[in-house]
Structure formats: structure tokens, C-alpha cells
Amino acid sequence: MKYKNYIFDLYGTLIDIHTDENEMMLWEFMVDYLKKHFGNITIPEKLKDDYIRICAEETDKLAAKNGSCYPEIKIEWVWQRLIGCDCSDDEMRALCVAFREKSRKKLVCYKNVHKVLSEIKSAGRHIYLLSNAQRLFTEKELDDTGLTEYFDDIFISSDMGIKKPDAAFINSLIKKHGLIKSETVMVGNEIKADIGSAIAAGVDGIYLNTYHHTQKELDTDLATCGYDNSNIGLTIIDDGDDCFKSVI
């Protein structure tokens, strides 16, 4: 096993997920949810439009505050403005989970994920999660897929206010755990976010082509990320849904 430290992306890498926030049935469900739990009266079209608008407003405000080109808001800020009244942490968590689960069409681990993660742990290596995600969505999905137990630490972008490929995100993980870069690899399915983070941090990368991008698309994205001028090692695994078997 080449590396001592494995930093994994989550969605599209460990978990095969599909969500659809455009479906009107979702917004009809949320209208009923808000009326039942908070007494809010609205209509699906307005709720959807307000949600999109507030997400954009909160993102702009956060970018102005923290200066990142890749800001990551907390989704609870959006729902707090939408419901317009105070609610407990448990009520907000329940609301966000309800929204996520209603929008979600698929949530499964890719083939061999549990097997490979178990082998890495058994070999005494370290496993970290670095995910562009919302904690209120992701914690339960990690538990539901049985992945939580594998990680030495979990870094979620909504906690940090920034997301990949902002170098500060991956570097915060590396610094916290004192990782030696030559012993560390970033594993993910997005060139810009995951391999871009590896390039920014100066660690090797493993790219899993789970979404079947063409070589031309990969070459374009790698050039955009500055891969040609970097010194990192890069492994591209092009086995679609069965990429994970070749990670180690």
C-alpha cells in the first residue's frame, strides 16, 4: 500500500447519489411541512424561487466576509430566513433531513467501498473525509451507508465556510493532523474540486472517473487546474462504477 494517509471525497467517490431539487413534488411537500411545523403559508413556486434567491444572497454575503472564491454557506441559514421564526437545533435538523430525503432518488455506496476502506484501516493507514457538503445532510447519510466508522476525521465544507478547491480547506486537514505530503493522497471524482485540491496542497491525486468523462474532457479540466505545471503524481482510474477496486 503506497500511502499512509487517504483523503477521500464523498459524493461520486464513495457514495453514488442522485438528488433533484427541481421537481415540484419536493416543493409541494415542503410547503406542507412548513405549514404543519411552523405555521408558514406559501405556495410551491414561491418557496422554490425564494430558496434559490436566498441561497445566492447568503453565498454572496459569505464570499464578501471570508474572501474565498469558493464560499460554502450553511443551508440552515436559508431555511431560517424562509421560516421566519426561531426554531430549535433539532427542529432545523429534522427540516433539513426531510428536504434532503424527499429530494433524493438514490443513495448507495459504490462497489468495493467497504472492502477497500476496511483493507486500508486494517493496514494501519489513516482515512479522512474532505467533502463539499452540508453537515445536516451528510452526517445521516454517512451513518445510513455505514461509512462513519472508517474515518479518522471528517471535514465538511459547510463547517468551514469554504469548499474545494480552496486550498485552505484541504490544508486545514493536513495541518491539523500533521500529514506528510509525500505520504498522502487525495481521492475523488472531480478534476477541479478534488485533483485541484491535490495540486493546491502538493499531494498526489487519484481520480475516479465514475461519471464516464471523455479523455478530452479530462485533459481540458486538468489543464485548467494547472496540472501540467504541478509536480504531483496522478492516477486516473477509468472503470466507471467499479473504480474503487483499484484505489489501493
Image (spheres, rainbow, N blue to C red):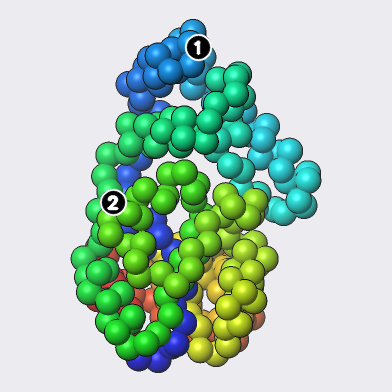
Position of residue 125 in the picture relative to residue 60 (left or right) = left
What element does badge 2 sit on? helix
Q: Which residue is mark 1?
A: 40
Task: Determine the residue positioned at 25% across, 53% down.
Answer: 108
Q: Is residue 228 left or right of residue 139?
A: right
Whichever of callouts 2 and 1 sits on the residue coming sooner in the sequence is 1
At label 2, counting other C-alpha atoms closer than 10 Å, the crowd grade (few under 14, some 14-19, many 20 or more) is: few
Note whether residue 197 is visible.
Answer: yes
Task: Give the amino acid at mark 2.
Answer: Asp
Q: How many marks?
A: 2
Dot 1: within a 10 Å radius of its alpha carbon, few (fewer than 14), some, or many (20 or more) residues? some
Relative image position of residue 111 (x, y in whole percent) = 21, 65
Q: Which mark is residue 144?
A: 2
Q: Quadrant of the N terminus?
A: bottom left
Query: Residue 73: x percent and y percent?
Result: 61, 43
Front residue of 26 and 32: 32
Q: Secondary structure at mark 1?
A: loop
Residue drawn 31% across the image and 74% down it = 117
- Nearer to me, 117 or 103: 117
Identity, as a three-letter code, of the amino acid under mark 1: Asn
Q: Can you tell which quarter of the image residue 96 is in?
A: top left
Position above or below: 230 against 44:
below
Q: Are marks 2 and 1 in contact (CB under 8 Å)?
A: no
What residue is shown at x 57% (from left), y 60% (from top)? 164
* Residue 227 visible in the current orientation: no
Which residue appears at 43% of the width and 44% of the height? 137
Q: Quadrant of residue 142?
A: bottom left
